[in-house]
Image (tube, grey):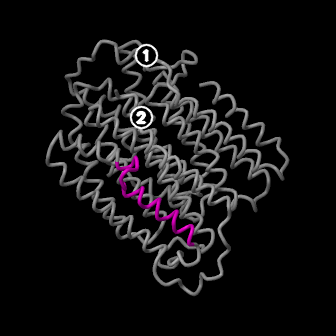
Amino acid sequence: MLKVLIPTVMLFPTIWLTAPKWLWTTTTAHSLLIALISLTWLKWTSETGWTSSNAYLATDPLSTPLLVLTCWLLPLMILASQNHINPEPINRQRLYITLLASLQTFLIMAFGATEIIMFYIMFEATLIPTLIIITRWGNQTERLNAGTYFLFYTLAGSLPLLVALLLLQQSTGTLSMLILPYSQPLTLISWGHKIWWAGCVIAFLVKMPLYGVHLWLPKAHVEAPVAGSMVLAAVLLKLGGYGMMRMMVMLDPLSKELAYPFIILALWGIIMTGSICLRQTDLKSLIAYSSVSHMGLVAGGILIQTPWGFTGAIILMIAHGLVSSALFCLANTAYERTHSRTMVLARGLQMIFPLTAVWWFVANLANLALPPLPNLMGEIMIITTLFNWSPWTIALTGTGTLITAGYSLYLFLMTQRGPTPNHILGLPPFHTREHLLMTLHLLPVILLVTKPELMWGWCY
């Protein structure tokens, strides 16, 4: 764990001491080196499940894929931001990259924490850099409103979790993830216990986000700069899924009856947010709502509490993280050239950028879960688990899958096909940097097809 955490902390002096001319090159190289070091986590040697570096930081096969995804994303965020942050004063550029690096530090400590209270503190700490990125570097005037939504939805959801954790500490005497699953099962019978159960789960459902408490996400995504959108879609939503997986182990007897309304809400959310996508005119808003739809499936898979459901959830989280981030990068490249996120005003781009149309096509196919990509693998496992739990769910998940295919094709056809409007003919060409960015997003998705057990090995 420290082999990645220490180089990440060393990023801060690198950012502030590098010459202005070499700032982007040095930070990209340094963060890419951290990403490559993090790949060594995938070589699993421990038989017990946990590989500990000290009493408070450890990795296990559930956190490892998410840790690698976090480290992989930092160089990509720096690459994606280069163009629109470059014109700013050098100290603001340094501050921007510092916020991204601090976000990575908090995320590594959140996913690597063995104490639940430390996970909670790091879970909350990620709010601060994300909030500054959205409110300071967002594009439109709505960004302060979006930041307020983001902050208060997440805080309102997670303060009950703090109380629930303190009560758990009082009753069991420990909050260590290494000990809690093997401690005495809690006898949960009263109404108070049911409220405690809700307190433990709701924070993560807001973060995921579950349909009904999802309104902060489209606002935050649409207003955030590209790196903010990437880290929100790829990693911050996964904090919710990861936290739920960790907590569900302890909530067992009550979950059987109390999870029903949340599962139904998650499945209904797949259809509702998918239908909203079909009517969107704003490019980033469409991709943001599609994230809510996919996370609904993940929430359903986790709440069922079977090995298949958990496995499908982790696979879909990793695959969605890469694909959704890629789609936001593509939306940003189109926005930087046409200065419009309205799909009708920026269509027919295939004629001008044929290679970029290929990236759009691959990213959209991954988003609609084309076989044999990991997105399909995760979705099929979750849908099978849900069907096994109740055959009626196939009506909702099946409709959701069809709608996903519909809005993915709509997104591709609206942006790439059709007549090119006269006002966007003189666009600057794509850079090698942007093609490299897309390669680094989509290559791992395609390579995971060949070795999917890197994501699911922990369940069996």
Q: Looking at this view, name the residue that lies furthest to the left.
A: 391
* Residue on which the image places disc 1: 48
Magenta part, dominant SS: helix
Number of marks drawn: 2
Find the distance from the CA under tag 1 to the CA under tag 2: 17 Å
Q: Dot 1 lies on which element? A: loop
| Badge nearest the viewer, 1 or 2 | 2
Q: Amino acid at mark 1?
A: Thr
In which quarter of the view is residue 196 placed? top left
Residue at 57%, 34% in the rendered image: 39
Given the image, on which type of amino acid does mark 2 rest?
Glu
Q: Name the image quarter holding the N terminus.
A: top right
Q: Residue furthest front?
A: 450
Residue 165 position within the rendered picture, expressed as x and y whole percent measured from the top left: 40, 24
User: Residue shown at 49%/43% (left/top)?
Assistant: 236
Please determine whether, in this image, residue 358 is positioned above or below residue 168: below
Rendered image quadrant of residue 177: top left
Residue 453 — which label? 2
